[in-house]
Image (tube, rainbow, N blue to C red):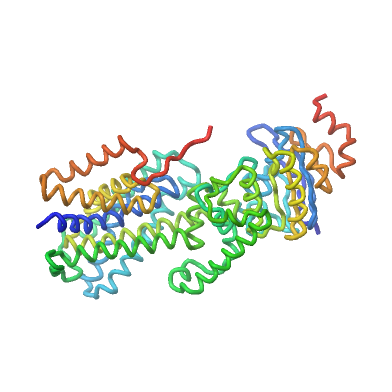
Amino acid sequence: MDFTTHVINGLGLGSIYALVALGYSMVYGIVQLINFAHGDIIMVGGYSVYLIMVMNGLPAWIAIPASLIICAVMGMLIERIAYHRLLVHNAARISLLITALGVSMFLQNSFMLLFGSEPKAMSIFDSQPINLGSLVLDFSTLLNISVSVVMMIGLQLLVNKTKIGKAMQATSEDAGAAKLMGINTNNVVLFTFAVGSALAAVGAVLYCNTYPQIKPDMGNLLGLKAFVAAVLGGIGSIPGAMLGGYALGVAESLTKAYISTRLTDAIVFSILILMLLVKPTGLMGKNRKEKV
Amino acid sequence: MHLLETKDLGIVFGGLQALNELHMVIDDGEIVGLIGPNGAGKTTVFNLLTGVYVPSGGAIRLEGNSIIGKKPYQINRIGIARTFQNIRLFKNMTVADNIKVAMNQNMKYKILTAMFRLPGCWRQEREVDKKARELLRIFDMEDTADQMAANLPYGQQRKLEILRALASKPKLLLLDEPAAGMNPTETRDLMETIRDIRGRFNVAILLIEHDMSLVMNVCERLYVLDYGTLIAEGSPDKIRKNEKVIAAYLGC
């Protein structure tokens, strides 16, 4: 395999990170909360597809939209049950963070209880190699890249061109002023969780299609890497999350190809540390200056 | 029926009576001033009227209906909009977007429509965009529409705050020190504009201001607060001669 193939494979993997990173970034942008339960939404998405497709034998075109809806509802439920009161009463950041970790553990353990802890095999689409001139690529790689690009464009349109998107921007900048301009910020927060979680479900479908197995703790490392991608790109920034995801995917793929498979994760996290040293706000992060 | 009426309105902050038994009425299309020394409780009144604070006692009625207990966004939707003493624009959004955000509740489509019935939704977006630009024309700011709000000069940021408040089609507009930091020429322009806005939008205006020439010129009636208590009310001429007011301002 040559360099180009490795880069494209990296972009394919990075697409999944990017989709998940968007959820971290959006939620952070609105309520300044690092939602560590977000990685587990991927797991919920994976198991929803498994439940519908494998256990009930329904086709993918039912399973995929259903898993999107299940994850969106799950995201909203998490916001309402776990975070809402903390957010409304301006609880300390650390309380929110610990709650997020608690939600993450709760989800993982409930799914272990429901489905058992052993990995389950599942494939969604038949994946054949595709020849593009001299390149041989997996169908899943191309699917990942194209889906993530479409999602990204859709999200940009949603955020910049629609009423709810503008309300999201306004809430993110100054929630107090947004309320006084007639924006129901509670609903904006809820909507943000729903969209972020639905994107995680899309990530889950692509992930399960690329690596055809699911297990209750699959969201841990994937979620962590997506979080790294979000920070790398500049948390709070939507294009940043995408860029961070792709960069991370490519870095991972090149490390595997030219350095060492075992060092992949170490290198990925080293990139994060370097980034934080050089540009703490991330690639596209805005420097928020506090006026004194 | 008055447009706005407060009765015995008061609020206590941990033992401090920040506002005490305020009676105030504002009728349709009036321009009313709220003045008083620093710390008299003027901004507190605004925060009570917009639902940011919940009063400790008393009543607030808008067109006869109590608004106590309503959330700030609900109060905005039923007709009270405001500007802020220290500018609180959405600085990283464009000038036009700042206005469009406030027009939100006048748009009919919901999230699902936005997702599945794109054409209707884009048409409404275009209409809102057009209206936002029309609104900017009031202050001759239409060429700033696509700039980031943060990049506007100070005076225009203040004006944009007024436009953003107007965009939500209020019946009552609360202006918190609209002339703060403006030079005398800008202040004079602002006076004209405030009268113009009242006529054009058929809106009542309650304004807090320290610039006495602006207050005396533009307001039809004044309320004077000192230490959270109403010490005088009436026409500018009456207030100018009121001994309590003079004492409060001169500190004797």
Relative to B245, does residue A19 appear above or below in the rendering? below
Identify which residue is drawn at 37% across, 46% down.
A284
Q: Residue A47: in sight, yes or no?
A: no
Q: Residue furthest top?
A: B252
Q: Is residue B130 left or right of residue A139?
A: right
Residue for point 35% across, 54% down = A22
* Closer to us: A190 or A5: A5
x and y, in percent, of residue B119 in the image: 48, 74
Outermost residue toward the front in this view: B143
Q: Quadrant of the N terminus of chain A?
A: bottom left
Q: Position of residue A202 (x, y in %)?
A: 30, 63
* Left or right of residue A30, residue A118 in this image: left
x, y percent for residue A286:
42, 43
Q: Quadrant of residue B164?
A: bottom right
| Residue A65 visible in the displayed image | yes
Q: Nearer the viewer, residue A4 or A157?
A: A4
Q: Where does the image place residue A268, in percent across and percent down from the top left? A: 21, 44
Report the number of discs. 0
Q: Nearer the viewer, residue A73 or B73?
A: B73
Left or right of A185 in this view: A97: left
